[in-house]
Image: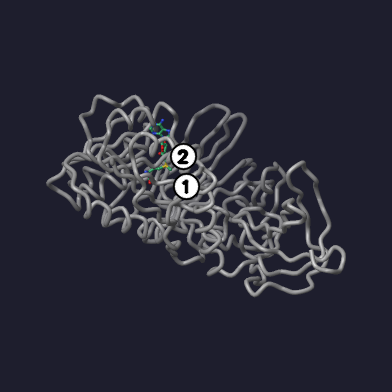
Amino acid sequence: MTAEKNIFNVTDTNSRGYGIIKDNGKVIFVAESVEGDVCRIEKTDEKKNYSTARVTELITSSPYRINPDCPCFETCGGCSLRHVSYEQELKIKRNTVSSAFRRAGISVDVSETLRPSPDGYRNKVSFKVSGSRIGFFKKETNSFISLENETCKNAPGIITRIASEIAEFAFSQNIRIEEIVIRRSTGGMLSAQIIVEGSEKKYDSLNCFSDRFASLSVKNITTGKTHRIFGEGGIRTEAFGLSLFVSDESFFQVNYDGAELMFGVISSIFSDISFDLCADLFCGTGVWGLALAKRFPDKLFYGVDLNESAIGDATRNAEINGIENITFFCGDASMKTDLGSPDAVIVDPPRAGLSPGMIDTIISIKPDNLIYISCNPFTLARDAVKLTESGYSIKTVIPIDLFPRTEHVETVCLLCKQ
Ligand SMILES: C[S@@+](CC[C@H](N)C(=O)[O-])C[C@H]1O[C@@H](n2cnc3c(N)ncnc32)[C@H](O)[C@@H]1O
């Protein structure tokens, strides 16, 4: 605190967009403030170890502060860093990854964050629907926030506009929608999955969108039925030098440019290591394994994922691309221990990271190289502790900004058997 009462210097920013003040050894997280701000604040919550606060008067504005370019920024909760310059955001994300490792007790050099274009990058958006309006739920609540006449800045404008058209049309037809999920291919093709609840209705009128979408399906979460109105129930896209089909139910990387950067990192790791058999665990539609199998045709690969639809897509994608040195299996990756002895393993788990069983499986397989792709630096660092205690050392940690303007950061980490 400065000499005048209640005036504070913000000394850091975290990836959730909170400025950090240290006040007599206690941390205060200040909403939507930035390192370098000098401000008056009002506390909004007081916990034992920290407080939260909001700015009541900005006395000096941080050089890293910018005007948020989205009117929904304060309410929607999808973005957390639209009030910070993009250059500073990349530094904040690198710090987030470093501090996750530091807090886990691991000292490691973290590379600079790789940057894709920060605008309009999402190829998939799920919109909540209320009546004829689309929007999002306010973060960690079920309060609907309408996009009104705005488009989501993180996605190409067409995605918001077309979702809005569907919501209005369906409302006029008495079809009550819970959610609309739009996907866009690299070539600009669109698919829609419409989520409804309750008793079945007639959805045929949605056929009128057949000239705008490659595929449109209605999924009723009450009856569990999916009605394919037209198209293949997914989208075809080009990525990583492959032609890919992605079903509505399968995971796919949401940022094409960012995922290409990530594949560049993974591919250069594989150029530098020696291996004969690679396991792509948590493989989804098989993208990493397939792109590597194409690049290294004299090596063998297999992929494992729990999701049947993703494994169906992965197998189909191998066929579409004529790739024969990869096989896919559906199941829990931690249980698939009977598939040979891979000397390279890729893991790309959900945010919860690796289960203790999965870590035991890796330790029993003992691959020479483990490529850990993570969307949560805290679970990555937690798992890295167990892996380093079991004979692995960390060679590289590379953050990639797959989700610009949000709190999220992706990391590729190479661990090698000592
Ligand atoms: C972050 S996604 C990564 C998918 C893929 N590597 C990609 O980049 O497109 C995580 C994947 O893990 C799968 N998954 C979750 N738990 C699993 C488990 N226990 N065993 C195998 N796969 C699992 C999900 O179905 C999902 O496809």
First of labels 2, 1 by sequence position = 2
Ligand 1 positioned in quadrant: top left
Q: Residue furthest left?
A: 298
Picture coordinates of residue 310 (x, y %)?
Answer: 36, 38
Quarter that holds the N terminus? bottom right
Binning the other alpha carbons within 10 Å of mark 1 as few (below 14), some (14 to 19) or many (20 upward) gives many
Q: Position of residue 44 (x, y in %)?
A: 81, 51
Residue identified by numbered label 2: 350
Q: Which mark is residue 375?
A: 1
Q: From where the camera sits, is residue 173 visible? A: yes
Ligand 1 within 8 Å, label 1 CB: yes
In the image, taking residue 304 as reference, residue 405 lies left or right, namely right
Image-quadrant location for residue 59: bottom right
In the picture shown, does residue 393 fall above or below 261? above
Asked if labels 1 and 2 touch by Cβ distance under 8 angstroms, the answer is yes
Residue behind label 2 places its C-beta within 8 angstroms of ligand 1: yes
> As drawn, which residue projects farthest toward the right?
5
Side of 229 relative to 396 (left or right)? right
Q: Residue at coordinates 58% horizontally, 34% vertically from top-left?
A: 201
The numbered dot on residue 3 is none
Residue 127's x, y, as percent? 59, 49
**Which residue sits at x=62%, y=41%?**
178
Say which residue appears at 27% left-offset and 57% top-offset: 268
Secondary structure type for disc 2: loop
Q: Residues within 10 Å of mark 2 (few under 14, many from 20)?
A: few
Quadrant location of the C terminus in the rendered image: top left
Tell me what residue is drawn at x 49 percent, y 30 percent: 225
SS type, badge 1 = loop
141 and 373: which is toward the camera = 373
